[in-house]
């Protein structure tokens, strides 16, 4: 089997910044309250005319420049997102078209905040199996358009952004192992209730905010910590590695307290965990690739480093990938 490695990274965030001080004018809250409970200071939100494909396109262009490749050099484009431009066509098709990548394969993955973990596993498999030589994976979200701006519990959490990686066939294999899982028995814990075939959007849904993000915060928090640790353990076991072998942890940026719990369990010091939640908030499927792009461009990640990517999301879903940087 052919190996796979990441040869390019890129990210993008909208210009508009919503800081905690601005949120203080919306809710009975404070910068201290938000920071102590989430670790968030700011988040980037789109303008009314910006869509998910616009953010994905900017991140894709940055990744292509980083890899010194042209759009036509990529054989397939994959976008992980919970909020595509349209129900169909796939946002990946739009991104590929705007890049000028004609006749290329393109599809979306929708598994919420676990999107990059699932996407990395799927796209790596396509390359390792010899189906494609190069694949671009993009995590892109415009969650500011989905938050209920009357719900303090969720409106403070989410931001917009996109991160992209380019995967390429390689003699040495960076993909060491993955662990994916889901439990769809309690979708009501984290969901947008209206807008799908179960409940199309109507005036009643709009009036009650059913077309906006709803989350049972305490239940999701407990679930996240448990599943992130379990997924990491399982992925490391599959890779034949111990916790002490991990050089870098790049977790989904959902809540600083969740990240701290994962760091404590893995005995990873702060300098070996990539955390940017203070700047971007929770950008769902975009959070891990944004963090990876920033770390790589800052020179923090070195060849040979063993990285654990780990996250959780709606579904409920979770996963971890063990990756050796090349």
Image (cartoon, helix red, strand yellow):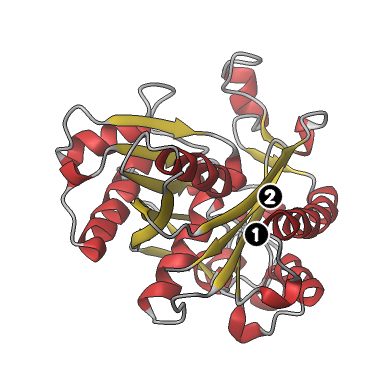
User: Is disc 2 placed on a helix, strand or loop?
Assistant: strand
Q: Badge 1: how crowded within 10 Å, few (<14), some, or many (20+)? A: many
Q: Nearer the viewer, residue 110 or 141?
A: 110
Q: Is residue 184 left or right of residue 282?
A: right
Which residue is drawn at the image coordinates 25% and 65% (left, top)? Answer: 66
Q: Is residue 54 above or below residue 193?
A: below
Residue tagged 2: 312
User: Which image quadrant for residue 255?
Assistant: bottom right
What residue is at 43 percent from the left and 34 percent from the top? 84
Residue 25: name its quadrant. bottom right
Residue 48 point in image, percent of width and height: 35, 44
Q: Report x, y in % for residue 136.
A: 34, 46
Q: Residues within 10 Å of mark 2 (few under 14, many from 20)?
A: many
Q: Quadrant of residue 99?
A: top left
| Residue at which label 1 appears | 254
Q: Which mark is residue 315?
A: none
Q: Residue at x 18, y 55 (%)?
A: 69
x, y (%) of residue 195?
A: 57, 22
* Percent x, y of residue 188: 77, 32
Of the two numbered discs 2 and 1 on the same chain, state the one appearing first in sequence: 1
Q: Are marks 2 and 1 in contact (CB under 8 Å)?
A: yes
Q: Which is nearer the eye, 113 or 303?
A: 303
Kindly report the distance in space between the C-alpha atoms of the residues bearing marks 2 and 1.
9 Å
């Amino acid at each position: 089997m052919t190996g796979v490695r990441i040869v390019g990274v890129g990210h993008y965030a909208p210009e508009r910044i919503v800081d905690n001080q601005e949120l203080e004018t919306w809710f009975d809250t404070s910068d201290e309250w938000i920071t102590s409970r989430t670790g968030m200071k700011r988040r980037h939100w789109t303008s009314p005319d910006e869509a998910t494909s616009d953010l994905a396109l900017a991140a894709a262009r940055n990744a292509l420049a980083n890899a010194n490749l042209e759009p036509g050099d990529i054989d397939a484009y994959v976008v992980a997102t919970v909020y595509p431009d349209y129900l169909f066509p796939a946002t990946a098709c739009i991104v590929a078209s705007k890049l000028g990548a004609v006749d290329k394969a393109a599809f979306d993955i929708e598994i919420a905040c676990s999107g990059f973990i699932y996407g990395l596993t799927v796209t790596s498999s396509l390359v390792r199996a010899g189906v494609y030589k190069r694949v671009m994976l993009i995590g892109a979200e415009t969650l500011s358009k989905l938050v209920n701006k009357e719900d303090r519990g969720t409106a403070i959490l989410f931001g917009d952004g996109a991160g992209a990686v380019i995967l390429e066939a390689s003699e040495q294999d960076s993909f060491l192992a993955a662990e994916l899982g889901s439990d769809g028995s309690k979708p009501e814990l984290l969901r947008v209730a209206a807008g799908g075939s179960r409940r199309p959007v109507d005036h009643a849904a709009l009036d009650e905010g059913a077309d906006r993000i709803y989350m049972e915060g305490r239940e999701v928090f407990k679930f996240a910590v448990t599943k992130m640790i379990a997924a990491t353990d399982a992925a490391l076991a599959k890779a034949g590695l111990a916790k002490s072998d991990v050089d870098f942890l790049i977790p989904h940026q959902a809540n600083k307290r969740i990240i701290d719990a994962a760091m404590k369990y893995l005995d990873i010091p702060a300098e070996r965990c990539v955390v940017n939640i203070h700047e971007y908030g929770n950008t769902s499927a975009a959070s891990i690739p944004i963090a990876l792009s920033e770390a790589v461009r800052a020179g923090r990640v070195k060849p040979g480093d063993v990285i654990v990517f780990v996250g959780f999301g709606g579904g409920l879903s979770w996963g971890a990938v063990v990756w050796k940087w090349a």
